[in-house]
Image (cartoon, rainbow, N blue to C red):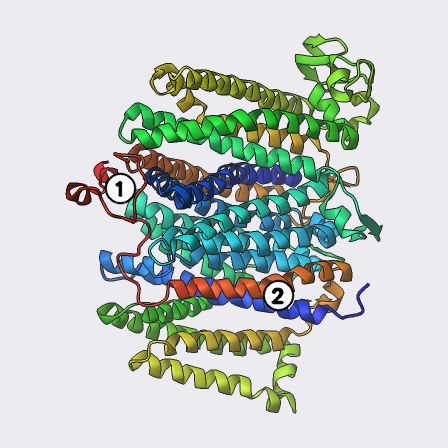
Amino acid sequence: MHLDPEFLSRIQFAWVIGWHILLPAFTIGLASFIAFLEGAYALTKRAVFLNLSQFWLRIFAVSFGMGVVTGIVMPFQFGTNWSRFSDVAGNIISPLLAYEGIMAFFLESTFLGVLLFGRKLVPPAMHFVAAVLVAGGTLLSAFWILATNSWMQTPAGYEMIDGRFFPKDWFEIVFSPSLPFRFMHTVSAFYVTTAFVVLGVGAYTVRRGQSPVEGRMMLRLAIWFLAIFVPIQAVLGDQHGLNTLEYQPAKLAAIEGLWDGGSGVPASIIAWPDQKEERNIAEIAIPKLGSLYLTHSWNGAVKGLKDFPADQRPPVVVVYFAFRIMVGIALLMLAMVACGLFLLWRRRLDDTAWYLKACQFTVCLGFVAVIAGWTTTEVGRQPWTIYGLMRTAESVSPSLTGANVLLSLLLYVVVYLIIFPTGIYTMLRFVWRGPAATEDDAPVVSGRPKSPIEALAPASATAETR
Amino acid sequence: MPALDLVPIWTAILALGVFFYVALDGFDLGVGMLHNFAPDRSARELVMNSIAPIWDGNETWLVLGSVGLLAAFPVAFAIIIPAVYFPILLMLLALIFRGLAFEFRYRDAEHRTFWDHGFAAGSALAAFAQGVVLGSFIQGFQVEGRHFVGGSFDCFTPFSIFCGIALMFGYGLLGAGWLIIKTEGALQDWARALGRKCLIGTVLAIAVVSLWTPWTDPKIATRWFSWPHIAYLAPVPIITAALVLYAWRTLHNASEYGPFIAGLGLFVMSYIGIAISLWPMIVPGHFTLYQAAAAPSTQAFLLIGTLFLLPIILTYTAWSYWVFRGKVRADIGYHH
């Protein structure tokens, strides 16, 4: 078998970023959630918020640590495996990556120390500020990384000199055409992902009954949040799709499985796209619907894959199915939220066993959707690293042999297969242990217990039972 | 286009960034290596706790170093990083292991010994790999046009491997210095004893590298030993020797900050020594700092934010060290 350094480098990049992206998908949402809990505690002094914040902080610390170490791998990939891309595009993408580092990474890492270890060392207000800064840091981090990615997807504000990119307008570079949509769609996806984790953990906590106040609070916070954000996410996704139609029509055609463009195009529900034959096998499609949701008009014109040379089309099957997995999960999420709201309205939420069990299974939904969405956008922009301008094949480091990359890929595979299961298991143990339980959900009045007995039985004692 | 020449500014910022990384992650990698030799479990806990709140902040300087190189001197990044493909890979994997050993050893108690070894081995391997990167950087790479064209294993030479071992001793010295500051009593004595061993290793390594580089590269020899260079470069070896004496003395007497400061001093001097040998090259033998510089607009765009943010970063880095100052105590551990 011929070992192709380009193909193996792509697999390696997909492997390291595929695992890495799961962590920000969780920590970005969780950081904001913890800041919310800290704020709620500072305002209401209700013990439930403190218990929940402490509980999620432990889990956050593990996932954040994993995010940091797997994140350090990423910028080095540009050098080790994609050095020609780094040389050609370095003038443009490097400040964006560097701003991520100096603004966000430091903010997160430094204040995380205060957040995790400083509760006894800094005043409570400072602790809340640290939580907000960590959350803000994670969002800034997402902004700059997505700005880099967006520029590669929809390049703007550059000029070419001697085959290399030079900056012309930094505002256009940072706020490239797809950035606003990509940023909102991604961050909202991360929030939804985290909320489904909170929902599932809340359901587990309620079912186990050890800290019922905390469990019920998690369920309610998650359902109300999702009731707002899942529909918003669908709208944002639609907007992002329209942006893709305008700037990356070949990707959109692959998403739709649309070979022949024209006006009044159908919506392909399910099919097997055959890249060689340039047609869909066993297709179920609805006439004209494609034009309606893509152009918001029954007869709107949409380009098909055949409008692009064969060597400028992405691998259609991957993009087509990744997109359908993402949308299918979105529908499932909507159903879960609708059920949850209904049960909440009927006051049956906490004792409907099948729903709580279902919530436990849907913990992973957001992560699968994030990977599917990311696959859609990244495989969909192939064969380009910089859309329409620089091919992936021209980006790979010239010195690498296939055997080199195979070796490094195998090592990444081995290490990630050790650390990720361990990390997930470690976080699960915290979930099994559960948050500290509140007996009475009244505000803690300046640390004075109502009776001496309560002073002898601190709420956190139950946390040590496991 | 800005009229201001940004290349020296970026050279200074990058040099500062890399030095901060070496100094900060250097001592916690050192602590990681020494951790394996700690006398008992409670000592190991204290050793870990001494760096628990700060290690990931320290590691982020590595991101600044690598991305800073890409931003300020993109072609240097595009040549150097693929040339040290495997040392970088080893370093990254070692840092992953070591970083997570921190998180996992507390929670995955059944496998604590495994993670403890992972922590020590990861620290050692990361230090070694960084030394190999440094060594092969000093020796230079096979370049055509704007690309590295050598093999991915070319970077493993006797010299680079020696540099790898040398850096392990250097980081060990910094780690011992840190532990002397953060611990007391028997544990501090233990750190002092290890510090002495690491100092001997570091001094030998500095001596060998200082002779090896001019011996193999006549240009470096001319730079150091020709008249009048030898006269005005003489302070470098003299200050280094003074620092070695100071380190040796403070490792023996009651000084708590001396060994760490002396260790940092030795790193500064080695750093200056390498800079003198290679100046003004960023890819030795091929690209000067000016030839490799990014577009002025790129350097300017990033400089605006950096000049504003770097002082803030330094301030709150200092602040977080201040919060966790003093001797390490068992009760402010890693969230029990």
Q: Which residue is mark 2?
A: B14
- According to the picture, the residue beneath numbered tag 1 turns out to be B110
Nearest the viewer among A49 and B166 is A49
Placement of A100 over or under B137, stated as above or below: above
Q: What amino acid type should be assigned to the residue bearing mark 1? A: Glu
The answer to which image quadrant residue B293 occupies is bottom right
Give the percent coordinates (x, y) of residue A62.
40, 44
On what subunit does the disc labeled 2 rest? B
Which residue shows up at 42% across the image and 59% down it? Answer: B54
Decide if residue A255 is on the left or right side of residue B108.
Answer: right
**Res B203 → quadrant:** bottom left
Q: Chain of mark 1?
A: B
Q: Secondary structure at mark 2?
A: helix
Residue B37 horizontal/vertical position (percent): 29, 62
Q: Amino acid at mark 2?
A: Leu
Q: Residues within 10 Å of mark 2 (few under 14, many from 20)?
A: many
Q: Residue at x 57, y 77 (%)?
A: B272
- Taking the image as shown, residue B307 lies to the left or right of residue B23, namely right
**Spot occupied by residue A187 in the image (x, y as percentages of width and height):** 58, 37
